[in-house]
């Protein structure tokens, strides 16, 4: 699945949702593969796409900033419904409790960082 950034919006604070001219690691027109999707019941507009920013870090952005340009889903994605009502589409290993904390601690190397890179390679190859 690939998307194109069509607008940038403020993602926090009192003016949340307002258009902005620039954002770190992303620009209008950028075409990127979607690494995972989160649909949260906590807010009506909380559909988030995880992409790799220009530094290749996984970051979350509101889906309404993007348009879909390629619809196929990666073969390593699974779907999980969590107790809080949130729906997750991602590699199963990334949905394990504690995975992301381990990833950010081990970014330079380690089991979680290696697992992230392996799953990301599949997503990038199929996007």
Image (cartoon, helix red, strand yellow):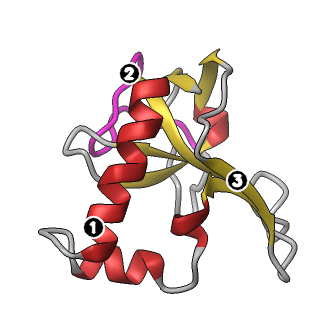
Q: Position of residue 113 (x, y in %)?
A: 27, 67
The kind of secondary structure element at disc 3 is strand
Query: Relative to 107, is 125 above or below?
Result: above
* Of pointers 2 and 3, the one earlier in the residue sequence: 2
Query: Relative to 108, is 63 above or below?
Result: above
Q: Position of residue 79 (x, y in %)?
A: 76, 56
The residue positioned 59% from the left and 55% from the top of the image is 16
Badge 3 density bin: few <14, some 14–19, many ≥20, Cα 10 Å: some
Write down the residue under mark 1.
113
What is the span of residues highlighted in magenta in the rendered image? 18-30
Write down the residue under mark 3.
78
Inter-mark Cα distance, 3 to 1: 19 Å
Give the quarter of the image for residue 42. bottom right
Which mark's residue is nearer the viewer, 2 or 3?
3
Is 19 magenta? The answer is yes
Is 115 magenta? The answer is no
Mark identifier at residue 30: 2
Inter-mark Cα distance, 1 to 2: 25 Å
């Amino acid at each position: 699945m690939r998307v194109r950034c069509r607008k940038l919006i403020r993602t926090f604070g009192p003016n949340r949702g307002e258009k902005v001219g620039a954002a770190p690691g992303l620009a209008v027109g950028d075409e990127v593969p979607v690494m995972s999707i989160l649909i949260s019941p906590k807010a009506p507009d909380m559909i988030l796409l995880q992409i790799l920013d220009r530094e290749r870090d996984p970051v979350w952005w509101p889906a309404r900033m993007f348009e879909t340009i390629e619809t196929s889903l990666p073969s390593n994605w699974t779907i999980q419904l969590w107790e809080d009502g949130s729906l997750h589409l991602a590699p199963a290993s990334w949905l394990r409790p504690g995975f992301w904390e381990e990833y950010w601690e081990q970014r330079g190397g380690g089991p979680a960082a290696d697992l992230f890179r392996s799953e990301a390679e599949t997503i990038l190859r199929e996007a």
